[in-house]
Image (cartoon, rainbow, N blue to C red):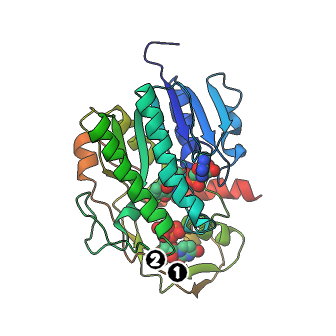
Amino acid sequence: MSLSSKRILITGGAGFLGSHLCERLLGEGHDILCVDNLFTGHKRNIATLLDNPRFEFMRHDVTFPLFVEVDEIYNLACPASPVQYQVNPVQTTKTSVHGAINMLGLAKRVRAKVFQASTSEVYGDPEVHPQPESYWGQVNPIGPRACYDEGKRCAETLFFDYHRQHALKIKVARIFNTYGPRMDPNDGRVVSNFIVQALQGRPITIYGDGRQTRSFCFVDDLIDGFVRLMASPDEVTGPINLGNPGEFSMLELAEKVVAQTGSSSKIVFEPLPRDDPRQRRPVIDLARDHLGWIPRVSLDDGLQRTIAYFRALLT
Ligand code: NAD
Ligand code: UDP
């Protein structure tokens, strides 16, 4: 092992983002321990990594303690799609909160640096637009999204208390909607839903009037932000927004997907889920100034690469 090579634990490593992070860090010569209970992740996401002697997969639920020797921890374990995190909301809160406690406890024991995959959902249905990290958010604490939103907010609280109380090195990223190859075709998120529907010639389901907005970041850009944040000076703890500030309505997204796939699918309107945020756009000045990070991939280019992935997956 070279001097700069680290032992890195990635929880949720068999998921969409986690598998890309495993790949990136393996490529940099690190030893990767991928921990996942495969609730929303898949072995197919890490299939090409299993033969690499520096890669190890462990099936484990982060709500239970874990004892391993590592230098860095990326804590990504948690279902991220509203459909999936509402399947078993109690387990979602446990995964965020007990998972954070277990990973922080591990980090404290082995003095590892620890990264938390937080979310723009901490801003809830925001009254401040676009959202800077200083905004405390507007979250319904008892609604159907609360298991995820409040779980992630509590995890942030734990990270900052471990930092203040135990001088732990922490890195908290607030991730805005990210898309790309290896999204689960069935997990209900908007980009994968629209692309799969378009490729299969089924109606494109817009919830509500389609005027709600989101900012979509391509996965490669996001993973680059993760790695830069982990490598940043210790005083850069975050929370730090990582997302693409381009803002699109769901109607605009649907039209782009139909045009790029050449689909004959029609758009249909379905009821808006409760507490669905009306708008989302990150302020990324902190990421630009502290990490030298800005997203490079436009929505059109990223969609093209994601459509190619789903085309291959579905045929
Ligand atoms: P994903 O569902 O593809 O990945 C989550 C992974 O965590 C899956 O592999 C799943 O099996 C695993 N997991 C779930 N519960 C677990 C448990 N109790 N123990 C062990 N493993 C468990 O979702 P993703 O998009 O890759 O999201 C990864 C992380 O990034 C999540 O923490 C999510 O909240 C956060 N995030 C993602 C986005 C996004 O747009 N993709 C936005 C904001 C935040
Ligand atoms: N959405 C939609 N049709 C779908 C899936 C989602 O119109 O088939 C909408 C959803 O109501 C929300 C936006 O797309 O306004 C983003 O939804 P997603 O579940 O991807 O993420 P989140 O709401 O967590 O940002």
Please determine whether, in this image, residue 290 is positioned above or below residue 174.
Answer: above
Q: Is residue 69 left or right of residue 160?
A: right
Question: Which amino acid, mark 1?
Answer: Pro
Task: Locate residue 104, reporting x and y percent.
Answer: 43, 39
* Residue for point 65% across, 79% down: 265
Residue wearing tag 2: 276
Q: Is mark 2 within 8 Å of ligand 2?
A: yes
Q: Are marks 2 and 1 in contact (CB under 8 Å)?
A: yes
In the rendered picture of this protein, how many numbered marks are placed on residues? 2
The residues bearing labels 2 and 1 have C-alpha atoms spaced at a distance of 6 Å
On residue 273, the disc is 1
Whether residue 178 can be seen here: no
Task: Locate residue 229, reporting x and y percent.
Answer: 35, 39
Could you say which quadrant of the image residue 105 lies in? top left
On residue 298, the disc is none
Q: Is residue 64 left or right of residue 117?
A: right
Please determine whether, in this image, residue 288 is positioned above or below residue 87.
Answer: above
The quarter of the picture where the C terminus appears is: bottom right
* Label 1 secondary element: loop
* Residue for point 69% across, 58% down: 311
Q: Is residue 294 left or right of residue 107?
A: left
Task: Locate residue 85, reporting x and y percent.
Answer: 57, 64
Question: Foreground: 44 or 77?
Answer: 77
Q: Is mark 1 within 8 Å of ligand 2?
A: yes
Q: Is residue 165 left or right of residue 307?
A: left
